[in-house]
Image (spheres, grey):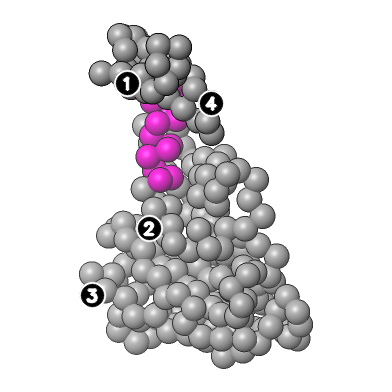
Amino acid sequence: MGRIKKGILGGFSGKVGAVVGASWRGVDYMRGLPKLSTKPATTAQLAQQNKMGLVWGFLSGVQDLINDRFQNFKKSTPMNDVISYSLLHTIVGAYPEQQIDLPKFLFSKGELMGCWRPEVDSVESGAIEFSWTNGNFMLLRAADDLVTVVVYDPIEKKLCILKDAVKRKVARVKILLPPTFSKHKVHCYISFYSKNRKLASTSEYIGQVVVA
């Protein structure tokens, strides 16, 4: 039921018949109810819906990182921007066989510099060690930048995150994984975040490794 707020000539809120009344920033307005389509979805529409489901299902696992570290965005929020990027650049294959191109996946984007020759290895059971070369430290590649690593298991369909684990100068970090990751080939990513938590690097895809 609708509610008249300012008398017979005022705006109203709620639904009256096929009209909905609302207010935005002090301006009253009315809009018609959307009509439900009886037409079956086209292949293109189904493909777009499937792409959105794939992207959102994957990105939701690193939403906290995206909100802080997907910078220089053009849309209203970092999540909106990374979704737009992912829909354009990370989906491969034709519907219904679409999938995410994992090397192109980003969870961080910014002006901070990355690293040289990042590598991953798994010797210790249930663990992966990340290592990298730093080069000369400077304003956008500081010794005390914080390191975050992400591991994705496509069999378990799970992400493991080690956030702000060590300083960049350490040049290596180890992440412990769930027992269910054992013997699986996983995808590995690394990113950097300034100590004052204002600048992020663009996340880097390192490659795959079999978990010991």
Callout 1 amino acid? Arg
Per the rendered image, the range of residues in magenta is 41-56
Q: Nearer the viewer, residue 33 or 171?
A: 33
Which residue is identified by label 3? 179
Kindly identify which residue carries mark 4. Answer: 27
Q: Is 95 a magenta residue?
A: no
User: Which of the two labelled residues, at mark 2 and mark 1, occupies the earlier sequence position?
Assistant: 1
**Label whose residue precedes the other's in the sequence (2 or 3):** 2
Q: Nearer the viewer, mark 4 or mark 3?
A: 4
Q: Earlier in the sequence, mark 1 or mark 3?
A: 1
Give the distance between the C-alpha atoms of the residues marked 4 and 2, in whole angstroms: 38 Å
Q: Which quadrant holds the N terminus?
A: top left
Amino acid at dot 2: Gly
Q: Marks 4 and 2: which is nearer the front?
A: 4
Left or right side of 143 for 182: left
- SS assignment for the magenta stretch, majority: helix
Disc 4, disc 2: CB below 8 Å? no
Name the residue rendered at 38%, 34% in the picture: 50
Of the numbered discs 4 and 3, the one sitting upstream in the chain is 4
Query: Is 151 situated left or right of 182 in this image?
Result: right
Give the Cα separation between the discs numbered 1 and 3.
57 Å
> Alpha carbon of mark 4 to alpha carbon of mark 3: how far?
56 Å
| Circle 3 Cα neighbour tier, 10 Å, few/some/many (<14 / 14–19 / ≥20) | few
Judge whether 130 appears above or below 154 on screen: below
Residue that label 2 marks: 61
Earlier along the polypeptide chain: callout 4 or callout 1?
1
The residue carrying pointer 1 sits among few (fewer than 14), some (14 to 19) or many (20 or more) residues within 10 Å by Cα, namely few
Picture residue at 43% right of the left edge, 57% below the top: 63
Residue 43 lies in the magenta stretch: yes
Q: Is residue 75 left or right of residue 182?
A: right
Residue named by callout 1:
3
Look at discs 2 and 1 and give the one toward the viewer. Answer: 1
